[in-house]
Amino acid sequence: MNQQTTAAAAKDDSSVAPSTAPAVVLVGLNGFGRQHLGNIQRLANENKISFLAGIDPKDPGSLVRGENTRIFTTLDEFLESGLKPDIIIISTPISTHADLAMKALATGADLYLEKPPTATLEQYETLLSAAQAAGVNVQVGFQALGSLALTAVAGFFENGVANSPIGALRAVGASGNWLRTTGYYNRSPWAGHRQLNGVEIADGVVTNPLAHAVASALRIAGAQRAGDVLSVATDLYHAHQIEADDTSVVRLQTNSGIPVTAALTVCAAEQQDPWITIYGTEGLAILYYTRDELVIRPNPESGKPETSQVFGRVNLLENLVDVRAGHAPELLSSLESAGAFMRVLEQIRTGAEPKDIPAAYVIPTDQGDQFHPVIPDIEHFINRSVAAQSDFSSLGAPWASEPETSGTFTVENPSNAQKQGIARLRTGQDISITNSPRPFLDQLATLGGVHVSDQQPLDHTWHLGVSVALQDVNGNNFWGGRTYTRADSRYVWRQDHGHIRTVANSFAPNGSSVRSELEWVGHKQQVLLDEHRSIDFTAFTHQPTSATGWIMDFAFTLRAREESVSIGSPGSNGRLNGGYGGFFWRLPKAENTQIFTDTLSGEEQVHGARSPWMAFSSDFASEAVSLAQRSTGHGAATLIFCSGDGDPWFVRSSGYPGVGSSLAWDAPVILDPGASLTRHVRVLVADGQWDRSAVSALFQEFGYHY
């Protein structure tokens, strides 16, 4: 509603409302308060409320708040007037909410409190106790929670999995690509602050601009009260010259077992409608909450079409009025239901301060009050974050904190006799449980700097660099993602994911090798396998071909503990040519790819072949680094995989690039208690694309021969 419309409404307005209509007072007539003014005038014209008074030290004028509106400069001044409100709306800076709300409660009036309700969890708990003692209604201004689309989503999971278009709920994600300018943060002294003059502010992207995304995701996940939240982890950054965060990931575990991931920024190149992704076992739904549109996407194999529906929305002030009158059963955004959100806010407030995103990773855009920093490819990282239930650090965003790493590997570059980093060993502890956390090699690069590994890519978020992964170990999934079962003859989501934990690492002093002791822990927390793993790197130069690169020897021994262990794969469970599992190397985006052995060529021929070596030669561009920075990690490289174990090669190129050595191609491998098996793969990595004759020569000199 514009100013002229608001003023016109005010002239025929509030004084005609019947005396039975609740009298409303608005504290804060500027900023977002102007949205409340328009809504108040609408409801007053419908005789649902009367507008008793407005409170603000800066009167916006009669054209905005109406000619007949009584104005007070402070809430204390209003309280001294003797006027009796039925509903008090507080739309003021976050730092003032707690004090004003406590004063409002003392009047006995119901309260509409803008989000977030308070600036600290302690303030929230004090206010909640006071509201319960006073016996009044307190609505919190998360307007998106009035969407009837949320009612529809709740219905998916209330009527049984068989009646749900996306199966059972398994995860919820919130995505926000917004744009905020310098003018936005210059609009008031408190904007963009965590604290100001010792007063808690909490004005970050998660807790204010895109707070509705977080609140909606929590509601869908069934997390409303503070006790519904088991843990909260944050990864906070800022590109604006502000104190608070403007680009962040929040990862939350609920007591019901539903994970919530929110990846949000106000440093996007263009503003998009934010959305909530609702992940089910049989598909997903996307809620564009600013326009109340719900898109349902069943799994492709179901054959069901995508559908879309736009829903209405219940106004939260109107809902409060209806609850007072007994016309609605409950508040849609009660103070009690904001507890889970306040747990998120408190973690952001008390956790590590946001880190600066260096200027080298930011594109400055526009000038003056319209200036805004753009983080290249932030949309890409936000998509990956939500899909993988991961944060910017774990995904390897170039401006993010270093992820959890056990150590790095170096070799001596033959061309300059200098030590050069070529890989790092990640702990895997930051990987989500449905991606089967495990140690893995990350950021593998040729001596020329071409990235030849990827991790947590958008197409398969459970692909983790170079690792050992198996999809069926006594019914436990150590691969990640869905599980292929013989009973279902398809991939299904199950709560069967195990993890591999590191017991000990022993690195060589020169940084070229590591010996690791590992435990394979099933989804019921039982140790199924012990593993000894060795990884060794050496550099090489081949004069006849002029190839220069490095060699990785990767060996692992799996030993069954106290019970027999069946090691299987989708192939051993009935999926034709789907026998992946064991050593696996996820490659980056690849173009102009050549795949061959000594006698075979192409993905279809090499996949499933048993040959002493196979080569994957391509132009690579890694998702492990920012798309805008790919010039430093893009280029041609050839990887030669060698093994004498006799296992078939698992090769993918058309769907995604990856190579593995299959431990249980079409039949399970059984280990009796105490029994073990060993596998060894040698990989030669060289810059440039090499043909069959050159690769054959390299294999003859450096390949693993039995």
Image (spheres, grey):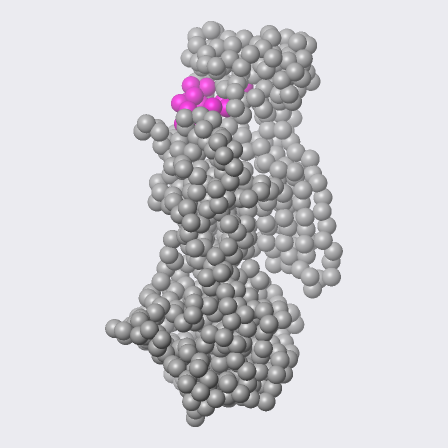
Q: Is residue 511 left or right of residue 527?
A: left
Provide the major secondary structure of the magenta segment.
helix
Quadrant housing the C terminus: bottom left
Image coords of residue 629 (percent x, y): 48, 57
**Front residue (pair 533, 482):** 533
Could one spot residue 532 in this view of the protein? no
* Quarter location, residue 280: bottom right
Residue 223 sits inside the magenta stretch: no
Residue furthest to the bottom: 706
Is 323 rendered above or below residue 171? Answer: above
Q: Give the image quarter of residue 20.
A: top right
Against 419, residue 131 (above or below) is: above
The residue drawn where x is 63% and y is 76% is: 575
Tell me what residue is drawn at x 46 percent, y 31 percent.
185
Left or right: 390 with respect to 331? left
Quarter assignment of residue 290: top right
Q: Is residue 503 visible?
A: yes
Residue 510 or 466: which is nearer the viewer? 510
- Give the extent of the magenta segment: 87-104
Q: Residue at the location (46% across, 46% down)?
A: 362
* Total numbered badges shown on the rendered structure: 0
Judging depth in this view, the residue of 553 and 418 nearest the camera is 418
Residue 269 percent across, percent down from the top left: 55, 44
Q: Measuring 49% from the left and 81% from the top, which residue is drawn there?
A: 640
- Seen as rendered, the residue at the extreme left is 509
Q: Quadrant of the N terminus?
A: top right
Task: List x then y, in percent, for residue 145.
Answer: 58, 36
572 to the left or right of 205: right
Q: Is residue 284 above or below residue 154?
A: below
Q: Position of residue 413 (x, y in %)?
A: 35, 74
